[in-house]
Every structure is written in C-alpha cells, then in structure tokens.
C-alpha cells in the first residue's frame, strides 16, 4: 500500500487526472476499475475519479509496490541524478521568480520543450533548478511537472514563462490562450522599413518540412495571422524592428516578414542573410494584463530581457543604435 498526501501542486485537479499523471503508464480503464474495487481510495472512502482534490487529502493505493512502479514513468527521475543538477540549473538565466512562476531568458540554440530525441531542453533545466533549490521534490514529479507556458523556436532567444506550481501553470496558460498578455520582439531585417504597419495574412504549415507559407488570401488549412512592426532604427540596407504578435502561430514573425520582402537576418529557412549562427529575433518584452485574485500583484507588470551579444554586435555593425 502507498499513501499519497495531496500538496499544493496537486490540489485543484480531478482525482482521475492526478492518478493518470502519477501512474501515467496505466490505462484509464485500470484506474477506474481499481477505484470501483476500492483498491484506490480518497480520504478512506470509495471514490469515482471526478472528485476535486484539496490540499491535505489522502489518496491510498492498495496495490503492490511492483505494480505501482510498473505503471509509473521513472525516466524523468533518472534524468536528474545529483551529479546533473548543477549542470542543468546553472544554464538558466532567471529574469523574475516568485512562488508560482518564473520568467527565463532563453538563449538561441536551446529547445523550449523536449522533442523526444533526448536533447536537454529548457524544461529539463527548469526542473533541475527547482529540484536543486528545494522548490520541488522528486516525489512530486510523479504527479506534477513544471513546464514552460510559451515556446520560442530553437534559434529564437528571449523571454519564456514557466509555471512552478499548478496554479502558476494554469494562470499563465490562460493569459497566453486569451492573448491578453502582450509579447514584443526585436529583430533585424534586410531592407529599409521606415513606417509602422500592421499586416495580416493566412499561414499554412508544412509539418514534414517544419516550414510555413504566408498568403494574402485564405487557403485550405490556413490560419489567420496578424503582425505589427515598428522601425526603431534604419541604416543602409538593414532595419531594426519592434514586433508585436496579435496571433501566435508557428514561425509567424519569420515567415510574415519574409513574405513582404524583409527576411530576418540569419534566418536561412526563410531567406535571411547568412553569416550568423541563428536568426536575429529576440523576445524582449512581456506585459501582463490586469489580473485579479491570487495573481493581482502581476497586473500591468512589464518584464524585459536584454539582447544577446550576437544581436548587439549586429546593431553596432550596421549602426542601428537607438537613442
């Protein structure tokens, strides 16, 4: 028998969702069967799975340790042995942290989330940091995994938000989903852009090629996109832009600017100028909307991420400094 006390990161979710995370390799049918037979109980009573968990609740698994271990995914725990914690967490550049959320400055070349190929991503670094700092225990990883709430392309740098707790994850997911949070980027593009403009179009993604195309008219499978750009500096054949997304689609900024003849410098996939290790696109600013309740302290708060050195060097090279 194993006894599980519900903590703050498990509270607020349905019991069946919690069990599905704790024994992620077990089928739903097995879990419901165990609840019907009272091999899984909640606070000493029979349960059905739809109960909403509260902090301090006790879930008992009247199953053998071998059965529990068989259905538990222990790979993530194996990935975080003591010897690897400092290495993982030491790579994080933290812009802001409170008990529920983290804002990170992701370097270019790092995945936001794992791609299934075993490469270390920002999520693994985040978990390593939380384990090392004591904000997360190895036992909690069985039912709750902190994660990032917005993703940047591998070769795009800048602000990525992450939830340390279930409440933090839910809050961030909501403001990104309803697009009340404002995200601003800076990029250097080919050509001269001297006027602020909002452009619209339709984006179609080729999953196999991991590339998108932008069209002025609606196409089958296309999704609408809206992008606003503002020139910050112009010199010779390059422009430094501030870009705001009104829709957040895959490769949106890169493809949208390329479609109007101004590809981002270093973005080989969309025709950008070569000679740089990655595209000069940086998520530089995040502004929270008016928030209520637990997260009211974030209302209207603005966070910024400094430009990476490669980006700054390009600004100096083309005399794109702003006053």
Image (spheres, rainbow, N blue to C red):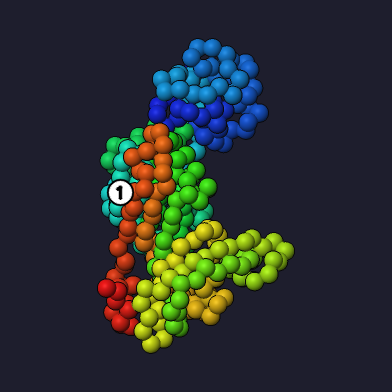
Q: Residue 96 location in percent, x, y? A: 30, 49
- Reading the image, the residue beneath label 1 is 96
Residue 107 falls in image quadrant: bottom left
Picture residue at 43% right of the left edge, 79% below the top: 194
Residue visible at 36% across and 48% down in the picture: 300
Q: Residue furthest right?
A: 220
Q: Secondary structure at mark 1?
A: strand
* Mark count: 1
Q: Tell me where residue 315 appears, x and y as whole percent.
A: 32, 77
The one nearer the camera, 265 or 296, is: 296
Determine whether 179 is above or below 214 in the image.
Answer: above
- Vertical placement of 302 versus 28: above or below? below
Q: 194 or 269: which is nearer to us?
A: 194
Rendered position, 314 above or below 123: below
Looking at the image, which residue is at 40% across and 82% down?
238
Residue 138 seen in render: no
Q: Residue placed farthest to the bottom in the image?
A: 236
> Which image quarter: residue 142?
top left
* 89, 155: nearer the viewer: 155
Taking the spot 58% from the left edge, 17% from the top edge, the residue there is 47
Callout 1: few (<14), some (14-19), or many (20+) C-alpha neighbours within 10 Å?
few
Q: Indicate the position of residue 179 as horizontal and vertical percent values.
A: 50, 51
Seen from this angle, which residue lies furthest top? 44
The C terminus - image quarter: bottom left
Image location (x, y in percent) of residue 250? 55, 61
Q: Is residue 160 visible?
A: yes
Q: Is residue 214 left or right of residue 21?
A: right
């Amino acid at each position: 028998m194993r006894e599980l006390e519900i903590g703050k990161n498990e509270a607020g979710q349905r019991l069946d969702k919690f069990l599905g995370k704790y024994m992620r390799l077990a089928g739903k049918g097995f879990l419901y069967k165990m609840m019907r037979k009272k091999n899984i109980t909640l606070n000493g009573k029979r349960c059905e799975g739809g109960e909403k968990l509260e902090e301090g609740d006790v879930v008992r698994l009247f199953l053998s340790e071998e059965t529990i271990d068989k259905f538990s995914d222990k790979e993530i725990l194996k990935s975080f042995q003591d010897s690897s914690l400092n290495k993982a967490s030491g790579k994080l550049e933290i812009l802001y942290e409170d008990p529920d959320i983290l804002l990170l400055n992701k370097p270019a070349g790092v995945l936001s989330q794992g791609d299934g190929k075993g490469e270390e991503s920002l999520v693994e670094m985040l978990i390593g940091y939380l384990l090392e700092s004591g904000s997360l225990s190895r036992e909690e990883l069985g039912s709750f995994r902190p994660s990032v709430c917005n993703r940047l392309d591998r070769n795009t740098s800048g602000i990525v938000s992450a939830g340390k707790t279930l409440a933090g994850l839910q809050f961030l997911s909501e403001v990104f989903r309803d697009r009340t949070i404002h995200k601003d980027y800076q990029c250097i593009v080919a050509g001269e852009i001297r006027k602020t403009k909002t452009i619209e179009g339709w984006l179609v993604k080729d999953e196999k090629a991991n590339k998108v195309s932008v069209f002025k008219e609606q196409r089958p499978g296309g999704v609408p996109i809206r992008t606003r750009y503002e020139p910050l500096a112009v010199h010779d054949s390059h422009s430094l832009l501030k870009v705001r997304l009104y829709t957040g689609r895959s490769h949106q900024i890169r493809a949208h600017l390329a479609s109007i003849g101004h590809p981002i410098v270093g973005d080989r996939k969309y025709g950008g100028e070569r000679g740089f290790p990655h595209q000069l696109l940086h998520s530089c600013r995040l502004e929270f909307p008016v928030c209520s309740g637990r997260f009211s302290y974030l209302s209207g708060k603005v966070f910024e991420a400094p430009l990476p050195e490669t980006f700054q060097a390009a600004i100096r090279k083309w005399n794109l400094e702003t006053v």
